[in-house]
Amino acid sequence: MVSSRRERIEAMLREEPGDVFLRYALAMELSKEGRQQESLDTLRQLTAGNPPYVPAYFQAARQLVEASQIDAARKWLRDGIEEARRQGDFHAAGEMSELLSELGVLGGE
């Protein structure tokens, strides 16, 4: 029986439940399957870790933009930029800053 990519990731997570990258990969697969809330919940858990997983902020914001939840996306980006800078990940901070800037043209705040 051929299992889906998500099922393979879930199997690996049973072996390594603390693997942050596998949990991130699971969130991405859930998103691809249209399971946005589950994906966002997984990304939220990743940002609550110690240390928070910086790429999760960006991906959550992108999903929220796709769902037309621009103000929520902005919050994720602001929090992500702050965390990325705290961790010294200036590349990620720059990417999130660019997206935040682009969201300015969409109105809102």
Image: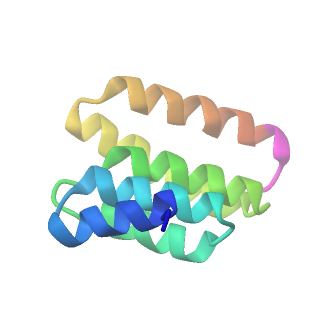
- Coloring scheme of the render? rainbow
* Residue lying at 52% horizontally and 36% vertically, measured from the top left: 96
Please indicate, yes or no, whether residue 17 appears anywhere in the rendered image: no
Please indicate, yes or no, whether residue 95 appears anywhere in the rendered image: yes
Q: Is residue 11 left or right of residue 69?
A: left
* Residue lying at 25% horizontally and 55% vertically, measured from the top left: 20
- Which residue in the rendered view is the most extreme toward the front? 1
Q: Is residue 61 above or below residue 82?
A: below
Q: Is residue 66 left or right of residue 14?
A: right
List x then y, in percent, for residue 57.
45, 51
Q: Nearer the viewer, residue 61 or 38?
A: 38
Q: Is residue 3 magenta?
A: no
Q: Main secondary structure of the magenta part?
A: loop
Q: Where does the magenta region start and end?
A: 105-109
- Residue 7 falls in which quadrant of the image? bottom left
List x then y, in percent, for residue 19.
20, 57
Q: Is residue 81 left or right of residue 87?
A: right
List x then y, in percent, for residue 50.
16, 59
